[in-house]
Image: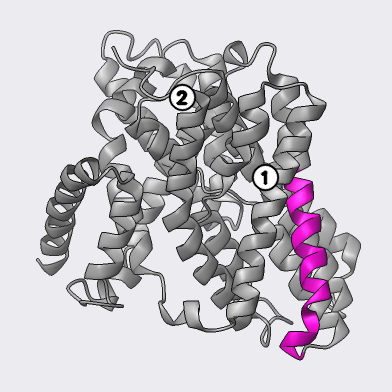
Amino acid sequence: METLLYIGFLFVLGALVERFSSTLYVPKVVGYLIAGLVVGPEILGIIPYYFVENSHIITNLALSIIAVLAGATLKISNLNGHAKEIVSITLFQSMTTFVVVTLGFIFIGDFFGFSITQTIVTALILGGIATATAPATPLAVVHEFRAKGIFISTLLAVVAADDAVSLIIFSLALTVSLTLMGSDIYSWENIANALFLITFSAFLGVVAAFINKSFEKLFAHHKGMETISTLGLIFIVYSLSEFWGLEPLLSAMVMGIVMTNISKDFDIVEEEIDNHLAEIIFMLFFIISAMHLKLEALFSLPLAIGAYVLLRFFGKVGGSYVGAFVSKSSQEIKKYLGLALMPQAGIAIGLVLSLQNQSGFESLAPTLLNIVIAATLIHEVVGPFMTKFALKKSGEMYKNVI
């Protein structure tokens, strides 16, 4: 009974946040995050720890749909003439962020009292995590302000591609780190394992997309049922990927990419989700995500947290500008797209949590966790404002209004 009571409370809270966010001209994402932090265990304690600790079913449900929606933005027919921009911006901003954050932490490593090896490992891991962008925040802000246009399609495509690239970069950074720390597992075996996980995760998403397409004729006159079966497949794929130790976000994202390109009916399903589920998904995800954040993390290692946020900012903005310049993108994309890539949440936290039980990271894992969680709090509060600013400067806000 208590669980249902808390969920009901969150629905009412979310509705109030949405109502007053528009009055205060604050992005709803920020309102959800602040509300979750305030009513959560860290401040008022209205929602207890045990609910937050057992809320993974809700957050996984939300993340699976968010990942599919992010992948669905990579529709080839909508990217004609822009593929070069997307690839260029994605690669330049990912690699620039990785290099800037990694080198930055190597230079300030003495402040932590780590050995040379620990400093390099810390730098590599933080560099890998820094490349990830939270797909939920840009999607939520775009959804809220009904933004549409070349800037938006490029942004969402870069976010989707960026998350796939970030998983690869992190896996390789972890492989090098384990080798530096003298892991018993040979580096080539680590690399092969990382590539296998990425490949099989993507393969699972492709298979699910084709299974979903096979249902089109069956539900040709029952579009509501087609939406339900698609949601069921999304949850199954995400759960199986997690159960098999794969990358569930990558599986769901690839499923979205393939479905939107091979299924003529997926636009209808996507519209159904957007009209009836998206708001609830974003609301629950952000409110509950904020409840996981620890305020004390903000006051531990302030130099490292500040350095991570600033270095990541310069990497994302600078790398995006260079990528846009190389691909001869518009001035709006050159100047402002990098700002919209600042949000960072679920993927980054998931990556750093994966290190908690990793052999060899016993002494480094708590430090890495505090840095990433504190930076997430900053990114998720400041990020939506920066995304909104970028959308406003692009001139594409409220273009998706019927």
- For label 1, the residue is 317
Q: Is residue 104 magenta?
A: yes
Q: Quadrant of residue 75?
A: top right
Residues packed near mark 1 inside 10 Å, few (<14), some (14 to 19) or many (20 plus): many
Residue 265 image offset from top left, x and y in percent: 41, 13
Dot 1: what SS? helix
Can residue 210 be seen at all in this image of the molecule?
Answer: no
Can residue 326 be seen at all in this image of the molecule?
Answer: yes
Query: How many angstroms separate mark 2 from mark 1 (CA)?
Result: 38 Å
Residues in magenta?
A: 93-113
Q: Quadrant of residue 157?
A: top right
Q: Residue at x 66, y 69 (%)?
A: 307
| Residue 385 sits above or below residue 145 on the image | below
User: Relative to residue 386, is residue 46 drawn left or right?
Assistant: left
Circles 2 and 1: CB atoms closer than 8 Å: no
Q: Residue at x 38, y 60 (%)?
A: 289
Residue 302 image offset from top left, x and y in percent: 58, 79
Question: Which one is in front, 90 or 280?
Answer: 90
Residue 72 image offset from top left, x and y in percent: 51, 27
Which quadrant of the rendered structure holds the N terminus? bottom left
Going by the numbered disc 1, the residue's amino acid type is Val
| Residue 97 sits above or below residue 72 on the image | below
Q: Quadrant of residue 100?
A: bottom right
Count of marks, rendered view: 2
Predominant SS along the magenta part: helix
Q: Which residue is the extreme one toward the bottom?
A: 113
- The circle on residue 240 is none
- The circle on residue 212 is 2
Residue 49 image offset from top left, x and y in percent: 28, 77
Residues packed near mark 2 inside 10 Å, few (<14), some (14 to 19) or many (20 plus): many
